[in-house]
Image (cartoon, rainbow, N blue to C red):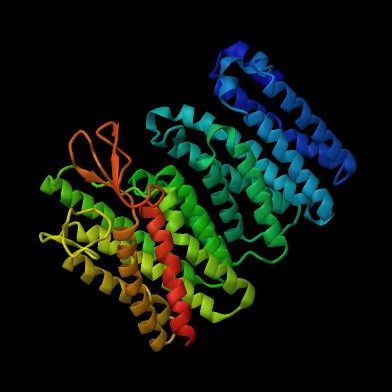
Amino acid sequence: MVVGAIAEKKSGPDKVISRKLVHIVSSLLWIICWYFFGCSIHWIVLNGIGALILGIITFSNRMTAFYGEDAKKSYGIFYFSLSTFIVALICYLIGEEVYLYTGIAYYCLALGDGFAPIVAKLLKKFNVEIMTGKTLFGSLTVFLVSFLSTLVFSLIFDMHLGLLFIFSIASLCCIMEFYGLKGIDNLLIEFSVFGYLLLYHFGYVTPVLEIVILVSPFIAFLAIGLKGLTVSGGICGMILFYSVAFFGRDHIPVLAVTILFVVATAVSFITQKVLQQRNAGGTVKYARTGKQLFAVGFVAVICLIVYYFTGQNIFLVFYFLSLTEQFADSMASDIGRLTRGKNIDIIRLRPIEKGISGGVSLLGTICALISCMLLPFVPLLFRTISLTVFFAVAAIAFVGTLIDSVLGSLFQALYVCEVCGQKTENAVHCGHETRIVKGFKWMDNTSVNLFAGILTCALGTLLLLL
């Protein structure tokens, strides 16, 4: 803190940089603790006292004495101290064999997150802002510094960490810093790296998981940059992919969910462009939110978790079934918007406006049928499922898309705008609250997708078991 304050007074740098100097200078603390205390109770007590003092200073607004008004925007320095204390406590409870992992996690946080804004500021003229507060060079700096820190640590202490694993640690730091807004990255980086190292120590890290974590930042940058995902969608997607890589035991589940999101995002992007060219009454929002990704992946991940702990292949089949139904429904919904013909309400059998749930079209139905054959072809190609199961999954998934339409027609909330008179699925339109004319307020499109996924797997349970 003193170094940061002196630097600010002498050279007048940005307050963010003076805060990050605290990050960098504090990297000396781990060396001091390692030399004098090691994995001992004294190390825990000192960290605990530091976290307590910083907590009192931060939440009593005393931190402004060091950082001025800028300190009110973030509790980052307290999170930094708190995460270090908790990691130290967990290490002490597990044992000295994981002590060096705390050093790697600490240096990834202290140096990686410390240098990122400094480099971003120095290269401001050439930098690219990916989203608010996060730049390309800042994220790449976290990646590079975290990689070098872990590599040097491994070499000095003869830890024999593989190169792919070290790269994956750097990527994990990068993605946590990217999504760690308002100082929360000071918790996420150290927790995630230390947790990942513990999984590695106990033999739970597979090459598939390493590769997924390695490529995740680049996919996140692309998805956010192309507006294929919102921030919440990116976070939920990251959790989904990591869960599939960990519980899937193989590359086939990861490949299937990757195809789903890549194809679905590309089709949504193209659909929007086509509708814009047609001037079809506004644009289509194709950026997926966290709620939407949760609805898509929740049932599938639950099936995969059960498969991981039981080893029963039937749950792996349910995983592919759930993904296939969600994929087919997405394709039918997006491509169905391009139809020149009418959409028909699946229950009332009368014309319905395009984009309103419960409506089906010939084009959308054909797309759903084709999509039901496409996704399960991945496990069939790798002989994870048989030809009989392939056709069963495709057929049940297609029925699931019809169930989705039925639920949308019967129960999903439909509103009328009091200003323009247009029917909509949004509770607010033209800047005013809309009037509900059908369904339940709590039943939106995300809820319909979630219930459709559950009912599809329930139907699959009956048919596949019989």
Q: Residue at 47% x, 74% y: name it.
A: 318
Image quadrant of residue 2? top right
How many dots with numbers? 0
Left of 22 or right of it: where is 44? Answer: right
Q: Is residue 384 visible?
A: no
Quarter holding the N terminus is top right
Give coordinates of residue 331: x percent, y percent.
Answer: 28, 63
Q: Residue at 85% x, 47% y: name it.
A: 39
Left of 180 or right of it: where is 39? Answer: right
Give coordinates of residue 238: x percent, y percent.
Answer: 50, 53
Give coordinates of residue 423: x percent, y percent.
Answer: 22, 45
Query: In this picture, is 456 found above or below 102?
Result: below
Give coordinates of residue 68: x percent, y percent.
Answer: 60, 14
| Nearest the eye: 376 or 155 | 376
| Nearest the eye: 359 or 441 | 441
Q: Residue at 84% x, 34% y: name it.
A: 46
| Nearest the eye: 134 or 416 | 416
Q: Is residue 77 visible?
A: yes
Query: In this picture, is 327 found above or below 41?
Result: below
Residue found farthest to the top = 9
Q: Residue at 72% x, 21% y: name it.
A: 57
